[in-house]
Amino acid sequence: MMHHLLDTAAMREADRRTIAAGRPGIALMEAAGAAVAEAAAGLARHGARVLVACGPGNNGGDGFVAARLLAARGFAVSVALLGERARLSGDVATAASAWETRVTDPGEADPRVLSLDGIDPDAFDLAIDALLGAGLGRDVDGVAAAFLDRLARTGVPVVAVDVPSGLDGDSGRVRGTACPATVTVTFARRKPGHLLMPGRALCGRLVLADIGIPDAVIAGLAPTTFANEEALWHAAFPRPALDAHKYTRGHALVLSGPADATGAARLVARGALRIGAGAVTIGSPREALGVNAAHLTAIMLRPCDDARDLARLLEDTRLNVVALGPGLGRERARALVEAAAGAAHAANRALVLDADALTAFAGDHEALGSLCARVGAAVATPHAGEFAKLFSACPEARDAPCKLAAARAGAQALGIVLVDKGPDTVIAAPDGRAAIDATGTPYLATAGSGDVLAGFVAGLLAQGMPPFEAACAAVNLHGRAGARVGPGLIAEDLPEALPPLLGEVLA
């Protein structure tokens, strides 16, 4: 269940239910502060000067606890508060009082609660950012914004409590300003904003701390947002039976572009074959048959110029998934999508739609949705530019407040699984489930990488994996393969990096 993500409203409810079940709020705060103190102690030498910047909410309470525990360990701690000490209440006031009464040796720490305004963070060796929580209602401004900007300029290591102050925990967006953290300590479960950009880049190393919220409480919230980790899709991953043959493992058809645009289809096909499809065929324009044939060995080749040829190919019911879009050209792609959707309905085939198969419907997502409604299983894999073109007339997706909401809206508009690619790829299903991926590397930003991903999806669908799980597994393995190859990566490397990863999954 650790791959479950909780938005800020769900996290508040988890706190409420835990407290209602008998665990006091101050006990949760003490556990959270202890985790923050442990992370901070790991970043600074014994006796280092530590500034703890506290806000008036529960994050500030966690900061007061961390300050007390660090002072007890011999660090020279100062606490600065945003707002007035007299206005603190509840568990936060209790934690602040414990800080004030704990310190007896001014040489170890300053027992006062200082004002945040005017504090010079450059005078410290380490800072703990416990100012603001994840559920911001407005942009950071005033004293808090000025302090965060000063802190960011110092280069002092920062431990953030829950999220870097100014980061929206639900969207990953910066509200006004935010100071990047060296380490972020969060509690019970991660939030979407920890994985969505730019939040992911601002959090530094993420530490997930158990503060005593039971797994049963989390399960009772029935989360529908997940980190795209192996636990999410492992049970559905295809495992060949002892009596398997190539057609029981599925047969993918990949449609090729013309002679000067054939490489994309071969990348798709290689990805589908390497991830486990029993057979893969490229449907190629006749003028490009020779070009494709010169590069293919285990992948089969058939002529396919137009929608009529495609319909004839799909009379073979062993072809159980069609991947199309890369290199096709928009006009040809639209006709082929229409033909493939009709044949998919008749034979219960799956479709993978990428590149031109999506931009051919720019501003006309409803038409694509109508075609997809005839298909039992389909996955679309747009990058940001393709997403924007496809959903330019869909305000729910176009104007969504964050990438997670946009992907969910796009999946619902099309009625299929949608993979919104990027450094924070989101996989969304029309039933509301969504996963945010945190694998991969910037080296995946290279020509053809997305084509291989489409092939991975197609290969898993060909083996009968459900569409949402297939898309999640494909994205995860694609990212892990990219990270394993690293610098110098080209798209052709990705299928070849899969076998050891598949061995790990199937072990």
Image (cartoon, rainbow, N blue to C red):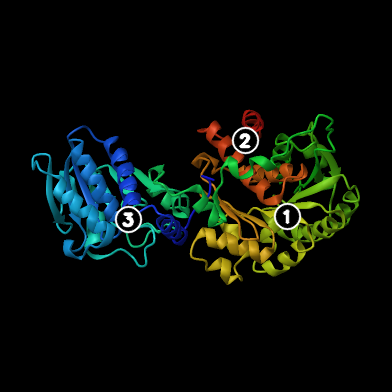
Does the residue at mark 1 contact the one at mark 3 (Cβ under 8 Å)? no
In the picture, measured across the screen, residue 144 lies left or right of residue 391, that is left
In the picture, measured across the screen, residue 455 lies left or right of residue 206, that is right
| Quadrant placement of the N terminus | top right
Q: Nearer the viewer, residue 491 or 294?
A: 491
Whether residue 228 is visible, yes or no, is yes
Q: Position of residue 30 (x, y in %)?
A: 30, 47
**Res. 378 mark:** 1
Residue drawn at x 32%, y 48% is 160
Q: Nearer the viewer, mark 3 or mark 2?
A: 3
Tell me the amino acid under the disc marked 3. Ser
Q: Position of residue 320 (x, y in %)?
A: 82, 47
Tell me the amino acid under the disc marked 1. Ala
Q: Nearer the viewer, residue 377 or 154?
A: 377
The residue beneath circle 2 is: 494
The residue beneath circle 3 is: 165
**Res. 500 mark:** none
Q: Nearer the viewer, residue 214 or 252?
A: 214
Using the image, determine if residue 372 lies above or below residue 229.
below
Q: Secondary structure at mark 2?
A: helix
Seen as rendered, the residue at the extreme left is 106
Q: Position of residue 78 (x, y in %)?
A: 16, 47
> Circle 3: is it few (<14), some (14-19), or many (20+) Cα within 10 Å?
many
> Circle 1: is it few (<14), some (14-19), or many (20+) Cα within 10 Å?
many
Q: Quadrant of residue 61?
A: bottom left
Q: Position of residue 210 (x, y in %)?
A: 41, 44
